[in-house]
């Protein structure tokens, strides 16, 4: 499955950095608690953008972004059907990521699409194949 990872250029100087899971480890995420490395991706580049936009303040200059496509083996992705707003989502995600290379989870900003969270410390992480890291300028109308 091809998934997409969008990150600020200052935190994504290269592919290894954009896929190391440091950001989620520092802050936690919807499907991973603080202290756990996780790489949040989306099944489409447009969903990756939407997931970023909901967290950006309106009316300010936005940072420069980069995007990378990533191939994850279909059989290595566990599909979770839990509600993304559940208070148990971090616990469920941590448990599933402890057993699986990646999990596919519903997006809260577009419930018709899914995000894919990758465990960069999983023994099969070498099966994750990144594509080219490229600039991803935001349209100024988003600001």
Image (tube, rainbow, N blue to C red):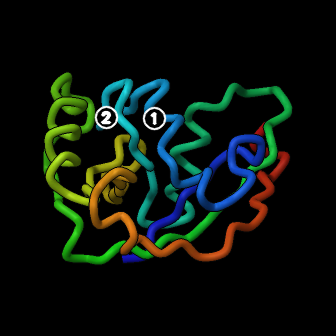
* Name of the residue lying farthest toward the front: 123
- Which one is in front, 47 or 76? 76
Q: Position of residue 31 (x, y in %)?
A: 29, 37
Residue 106 higher or lower than 33, as above or below: below
Give the residue number, with chain letter if any, for mark 1: 24
- Give neighbour class at mark 2: few <14, some 14-19, many 20+ (Cα, 10 Å): many
* Above or below, 46 relative to 21: below
Which residue is drawn at the image coordinates 69% and 25% (left, top)?
57
Residue 48 pos. (x, y %): 53, 55
Dot 2 or dot 1: first in sequence order is 1
The residue depicted at 56 percent of the width and 36 percent of the height is 54
Residue 80 relative to residue 46: left or right:
left
Find residue 32 and name its label: 2
**Helix or strand or loop: what does disc 2 sit on?**
loop
10 Å crowding of disc 1: few (<14), some (14-19), many (20+)? many
Q: Residue at x 26, y 37 (%)?
A: 84
Query: Residue at point 58% right, 31% down?
Result: 55
| Quarter that holds the N terminus | bottom left
- Dividing the picture into quadrants, the one containing residue 5 is bottom right
Q: Is residue 87 left or right of residue 14?
A: left
Say if mark 2 contacts mark 1, CB within 8 Å. Answer: yes
Q: Is residue 65 left or right of residue 7?
A: right
């Amino acid at each position: 499955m091809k998934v997409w990872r969008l990150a600020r250029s200052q935190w994504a100087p290269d592919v290894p950095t954009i896929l190391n899971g440091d950001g989620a480890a520092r802050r936690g995420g919807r499907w991973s608690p603080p202290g756990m490395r996780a790489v949040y991706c989306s099944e489409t580049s447009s969903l990756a953008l939407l997931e970023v936009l909901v967290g950006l303040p309106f009316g300010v200059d936005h940072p420069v972004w980069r995007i990378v496509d990533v191939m994850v083996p279909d059989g290595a992705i566990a599909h979770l059907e839990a509600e993304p707003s559940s208070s148990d989502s971090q616990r469920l995600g941590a448990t599933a990521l402890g057993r699986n290379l990646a999990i596919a989870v519903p997006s809260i900003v577009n419930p018709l699409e899914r995000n894919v969270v990758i465990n960069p410390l999983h023994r099969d992480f070498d099966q994750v194949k990144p594509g080219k890291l490229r600039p991803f300028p935001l349209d100024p109308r988003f600001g």
